[in-house]
C-alpha cells in the first residue's frame, strides 16, 4: 500500500505541477479542467502513503472546508474542485526548490567558507553572529534543511563540546538564524507567498525583513553573550583553536579561496537572475523562482561537466524525494481548500472584522499587534511555519486592511519567526531535538523565550511607530 501510495503521489503531484506551468503560458481548456483531478489524486495517494498520525491535520482542514462550503456555498462540489487549485503556484515552487541543494553538495562550500573566515569569526560573539548569518544564507538553498546541515557541520567542527552550554550556543544560533531567514529569503515559500498574497512590494518587504533579521541577529548575540556568562564559560579560546584546524585542512592554498568565490558567484547569479527575469518578463515571483532554479541548476551541472550527477539526483528525487514531501504537499493542498472556502463564504472577512472590532474597543491596540499571536497560536497546535503563513495570509488577503501591505507582511513573518523559535511541534525544533538529544521544550521555550519576547517588542515598536506616523 505504501509503495502504491508513493508512486501514485509522485506521479499525480508531478503532473499537477507540470500542467500548472504549461497552462499558465498556454491556456488549454481541457488541461485546466483536469488539473483539479490530479490535485485531489495527490491528496488521496498521500492518505494511502502516510500513517494516520500524519494525515489528521489534512483531514481536519478538509472537513472544516466541507462544513463551511455546505453551509454557505450554493455549489459546494464546484467550490471543492476549484479550491484544490488555490495553492497551485506554491506547490510548483516547493516541488522545484529542493533542486538547489543538489548544487550545494557538489563542493565543500560551507567548510571552506568557515575555514576562510578564521580571522573574522575568532571570538564567540563574532562566531555566533557568523553562524546565524551563514544559516540564513544556506536557507536560500536548503530551506529548513539548513538546520540539520548546519548543525551536523558545526557538530563535526566542535566534536568534543557536547554539554548543555555548547548545545545552547550551537542550537540557538542555528534555529534563530533559520527563523529570521523566513522574514526575507525569497526562496522561503512562506515569505514569497505572504508577499504575493498580500500585494506587497517585494523589494520593500525584503529590505524590511533583512533589516529586522540583522537587528534580530544583533539582539541574539547579546542574549548569547549573557547566556555564556551565566554558564560560566569562555567559548572564544575553543573556537579559535578549532578554526585554526579548519583553516589548515583547507584544500585551497594561498590568499584566494576558489570555493568561497564560486559560492558567492552562485548565490548572486541565482537570486540576481530571479530579479532580472521578473523585471523583464513581469512574471509573478511564485512562477519566476522555480523556472529560474531549473535553468540555473541544469546550467551548473553542464558547466561543471557533471551531467551524470544531475541525472542521478533527478532519479533519486523522483524515486523517493517527492514522496518524502507528501505530508507537506497534502497539508498545503488541504489548507488551500479551506482558504478558498473561508474566502468564498465571507468567514475570513468576518474574522478580520472581529479582530478590528477588538482593536477599536481596546485603546492603543490594532490588528498588527494581534497578527503575530495568531501565527504563534497556530504553531503551537501543530501547524508548521508554511501552512500557518498560508492560512493567515490567505485570510488577510480577503480583507481590506488600512495599513501598508509591507507592514502586514512584517507582522505575519515576525509571528512565524517566534513560532519557529518556541513551538516544540514545528519541524525545525523537532529536527534540532533529534540531533542534539534535548527536548523540544528545552530547545524552544527554555532557550528562546526571552529572545522571542525582545524580538516581538522590537518589531512592534517599528510597526506601531510607522502606523502612528503614517
Image: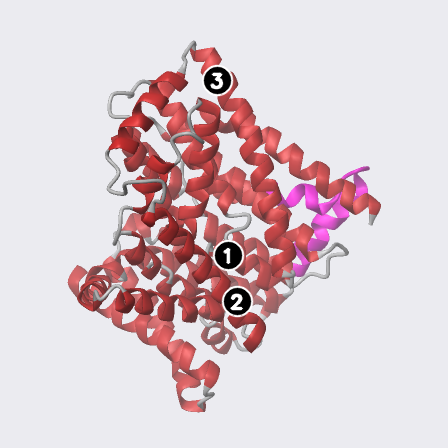
Tell me if 354 is positioned left or right of 157 in this view. right
Residue 301 numbered tag: none
The Cα–Cα distance between marks 3 and 1, rounded to whole angstroms, is: 32 Å
Dot 1 or dot 2: first in sequence order is: 1
**Considering only vertical position in the picture, is 37 above or below 443?**
below
Residue at x 72%, y 36% (from the top left corner): 461
Residue 285 numbered tag: 2
Residue that protrudes farthest toward the front in the picture = 254
Q: Are marks 3 and 1 in contact (CB under 8 Å)?
A: no
Residue 227 numbered tag: 3
How many residues crowd around disc 3 within 10 Å: few (fewer than 14), some, or many (20 or more)?
Answer: some
Instruction: Determine if residue 26 is in view.
Output: yes
**Considering only vertical position in the picture, is 347 above or below 81?**
above
Rendered location of residue 159, percent (x, y): 24, 25
Q: Which residues are magenta?
A: 347-374
**Considering only vertical position in the picture, is 301 above or below 221?**
below
Instruction: Determine if residue 62 is in view.
Output: no
Amino acid at each position: 500500500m505504501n509503495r502504491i501510495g508513493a508512486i501514485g503521489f509522485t506521479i499525480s503531484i508531478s503532473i499537477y505541477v507540470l500542467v500548472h506551468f504549461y497552462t499558465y503560458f498556454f491556456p488549454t481548456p481541457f488541461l485546466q479542467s483536469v488539473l483539479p483531478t490530479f490535485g485531489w489524486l495527490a491528496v488521496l495517494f498521500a492518505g494511502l502513503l502516510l500513517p494516520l498520525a500524519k494525515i489528521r491535520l489534512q483531514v481536519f482542514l478538509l472537513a472544516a472546508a466541507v462544513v463551511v462550503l455546505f453551509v454557505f456555498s450554493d455549489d459546494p462540489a464546484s467550490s471543492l474542485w476549484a479550491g484544490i487549485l488555490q495553492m497551485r503556484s506554491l506547490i510548483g515552487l516547493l516541488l522545484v526548490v529542493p533542486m538547489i541543494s543538489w548544487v550545494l553538495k557538489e563542493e565543500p562550500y560551507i567548510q571552506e567558507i568557515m575555514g576562510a573566515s578564521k580571522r573574522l569569526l575568532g571570538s564567540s560573539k563574532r562566531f555566533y553572529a557568523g553562524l546565524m548569518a551563514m544559516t540564513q544564507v544556506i536557507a536560500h538553498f536548503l530551506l529548513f534543511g539548513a538546520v540539520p546541515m548546519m548543525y551536523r557541520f558545526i557538530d563535526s567542527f566542535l566534536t568534543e563540546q557536547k554539554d548543555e552550554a555548547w548545545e545552547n550556543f550551537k542550537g540557538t544560533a542555528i534555529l534563530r538564524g533559520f527563523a529570521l531567514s523566513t522574514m526575507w529569503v525569497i526562496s522561503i515559500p512562506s515569505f514569497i507567498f505572504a508577499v504575493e498574497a498580500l500585494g506587497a512590494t517585494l523589494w520593500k518587504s525584503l529590505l524590511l525583513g533583512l533589516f529586522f533579521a540583522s537587528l534580530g541577529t544583533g539582539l541574539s548575540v547579546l542574549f548569547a553573550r549573557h547566556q555564556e556568562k551565566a554558564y560560566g564559560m569562555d567559548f572564544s579560546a575553543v573556537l579559535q583553536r578549532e578554526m585554526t584546524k579548519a583553516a589548515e585542512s583547507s584544500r585551497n592554498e594561498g590568499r584566494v579561496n576558489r570555493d568561497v568565490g564560486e559560492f558567492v558567484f552562485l548565490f548572486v547569479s541565482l537570486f540576481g537572475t530571479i530579479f532580472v527575469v521578473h523585471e523583464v518578463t513581469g512574471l509573478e515571483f511564485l512562477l519566476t523562482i522555480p523556472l529560474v532554479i531549473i535553468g540555473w541548476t541544469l546550467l551548473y551541472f553542464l558547466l561543471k561537466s557533471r551531467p551524470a550527477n544531475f541525472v542521478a539526483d533527478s532519479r533519486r528525487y523522483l524515486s523517493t524525494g517527492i514522496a518524502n514531501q507528501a505530508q507537506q504537499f497534502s497539508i498545503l493542498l488541504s489548507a488551500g481548500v479551506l482558504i478558498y472556502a473561508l474566502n468564498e463564504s465571507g468567514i475570513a472577512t468576518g474574522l478580520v472584522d472581529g479582530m478590528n472590532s477588538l482593536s477599536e474597543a481596546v485603546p492603543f491596540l490594532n490588528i498588527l499587534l494581534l497578527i503575530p499571536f495568531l501565527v504563534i497560536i497556530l504553531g503551537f497546535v501543530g501547524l508548521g511555519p508554511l501552512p500557518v503563513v498560508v492560512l493567515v495570509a490567505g485570510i488577510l488577503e480577503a480583507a481590506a486592511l488600512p495599513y501598508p501591505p509591507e507592514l502586514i507582511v512584517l507582522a505575519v513573518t515576525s509571528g512565524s519567526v517566534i513560532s519557529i523559535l518556541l513551538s516544540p511541534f514545528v519541524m525545525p525544533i523537532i529536527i534540532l531535538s533529534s540531533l542534539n538529544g534535548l527536548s523540544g521544550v528545552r530547545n524552544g521555550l527554555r532557550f528562546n523565550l526571552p529572545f522571542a519576547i525582545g524580538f516581538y517588542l522590537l518589531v512592534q515598536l517599528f510597526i506601531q511607530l510607522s502606523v502612528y506616523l503614517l
